[in-house]
Image: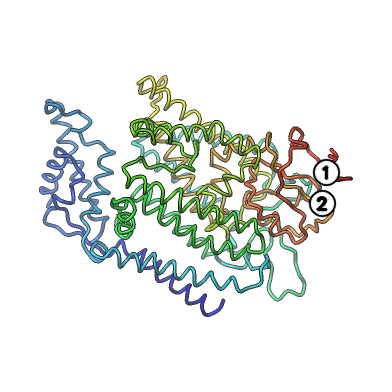
Amino acid sequence: MNIIQKIGLAIFTIALLIFLLANGLDNYRLTPESLSVANEFHKKEILDAAQQLGMMDKTYGSSFAFNSDFKKAMLTAQKVLDDKSKQGLPEGVSEWDFQLGDWAMKEYSLQTTKHAGTGPVAENPLLFLLLTFGLGILGGLLYIVPKFGALPGIKNNGIYHNSMTKGLKVGLRGAFLSATVVGVLVFGMFYLGGGWLWSLLTVLVGGFIVWKVRKSGIGNWGIGESGLPEFPNPPIPQFPNSKSPVRSASPSITGWLGVLTGVLLIGFYVVLYWAPQHITAWMRIADPISRALSGNEASQWFLYGLLYTIVVMVMGIRMIAKYRHNKYQIIRTFSVMFFQTAIAFLLPEILVRLNQPYYDFKNIWPLNYSFFFDYNLDNLINSGGLGIFMLVWGIVLIVIGVPVITYFFGKRWYCSWVCGCGGLAETLGDPYRQLSDKSQRAWQYERWIIHAVLAFAVVMTLMVLYTYFTGAHNVLFISSDTVRAWYGFLISSAFAGVVGTGFYPLMGNRTCCRFGCPLAAYLGLVQKFKSRFRITVNGGQCISCGNCSTYCEMGIDVRAYAQKGQDIVRSSCVGCGICSAVCPRGVLRLENNTSDVHERTSDLRVIHVKNGKIEVEI
């Protein structure tokens, strides 16, 4: 690490510390103006309750203390309004508007905390924007840009010696995952109002999958497709003259920097999804950019989109520096940077500025699970010609776009070139790609879980459409609102966010793509059985170095295919091409071909080219 990189790392660390500390710099004071988001009935009762509690004359030093008392005031107001509604509603006022529901309390808590803040961050958002985002970008670039001066190509870069990227011991990894699963299920019961039934059903489905995989008789690190032993990460060969020890198949030392990074990411997603009232200072910091784009204050989702886009852009430059010897990787990285910045972030904000629906044109159902929700359908239908176009565009992508484009290019066209989740995994998550579990058992879990998620998304959507067209609230005895709320909590929030991104440094960068993305499952089914795309191999050139398997983020034992001379046709393969980029012998090639599309799933297949003709040996 040269002096410029050290300076960049120091600047980035300072920016990160300022960002983390910003939420503790402001004070909070409840005023009638800070409660402007509430309607007249709610506002009066909440302010009366707050007056009785002594909130109106009190300044709070933290959002936690402020929200503790504010929640008491809202609960008191909720009880008063419930009692008044039993005596009769005001003329022309619905019960929905008069009573104080739990959903309204969550929104009031967030908006009131934000507008009640006073102090350095609230009064100087632009300054803190420069001190956090500005310095962070500068520090990141100073650390990354010198990498362009090194020789291009993949080298032994010490990923298994680095405390940030070496990962966890297998047992500790399982403990982290188990604790997260239990915590999510228990929290979900309380967050969704005591919905223990859905936590129980999730446990039963998960238990069935565990039983099914274990019944297959596959050991922890069993025999793989190649007939060779598989490991959670491919072993690195031992060199007797090496001055430093090399990593074994199962690391004996936990990377504490990686664990710390994982904890920070997990904590961020927890507060983002379920306690955004405690990060209102961060929203204040993002206000200047939000107002410039859409004219509105920054929400927690704008804050997240801004962070997401900046990370993809900065870490995308790192990706280009690392893989600049491979033209495919350079173009692909520019693609995900463009789609995230222009299509996913800027365009929807500009649409809002023009009084049009917020819409991400690249987000496809079932990844965009709320596409068929009643409020979204009504919003698009009632927004004129552009709204109707958005609705038709979304449906055409699902029914025609996905199968047709995947037939020609495989799932890589979306997962590795367009998708924002994939873009974050390929940029921010690239240093952790070697941590993906390559074992046969992990593959079995993957197949069961990801298709269970797809089935869940399909059933949930059918229930939502049924209630939308019939006006009924239930399908049989099950509320579609409860089903979609549990899907949003469990899959979209806990799986995609907390585990999918928070576990980058613990379990690899494509955990959600591999195990929990319903769109990846849909694309994968088309790719495996009806697509021209495959990774072809020249097995005679393979030297069994293991680079391809080590760098495969989707947990595919690529080396096993190469040693057999068998094309790689796996539904999980996202066609990122890194296995080809790190191969020292040019064994692997990403290709499209229709010659054997009907026999592509054969157990063994070797392709010979003779006199310009392709012969397939099975």
Q: How is the image coloured?
A: rainbow
- Using a 10 Å C-alpha cutoff, classify the residue at mark 2 as few (fewer than 14 neighbours), some (14 to 19) or many (20 or more): many
In the rendered structure, find residue 226 and report the number of the disc placed on it. Answer: none
User: Which of disc 2 and disc 1 is earlier in sequence?
Assistant: 2
Q: Quadrant of the N terminus?
A: bottom right
277 versus 119 height, above or below? above
170 versus 402 height, above or below? below
Give the side of residue 38 with respect to residue 340, left or right.
left
Where residue 492 sits, quadrant-wise, is top left
Q: Position of residue 156 (x, y in %)?
A: 68, 68
Q: Tell me whether circle 1 and circle 2 mark residues in contact (CB < 8 Å).
A: yes
Q: Amino acid at mark 1?
A: Val
435 versus 87 height, above or below? below
Q: Position of residue 220 (x, y in %)?
A: 67, 47
Give the side of residue 508 with respect to residue 74, left or right.
right
Q: Quadrant of the C terminus?
A: top right
Please say whether residue 505 is visible from this viewpoint.
Answer: no
Residue marked by disc 1:
606
The front one of 525 and 494 is: 525
Q: Position of residue 395 (x, y in %)?
A: 49, 32
Q: Position of residue 466 (x, y in %)?
A: 42, 22
Q: Amino acid at mark 2?
A: Gly
In the rendered structure, find residue 539 and report the number of the disc placed on it. Answer: 2
Give the side of residue 356 with respect to residue 396, left or right.
left
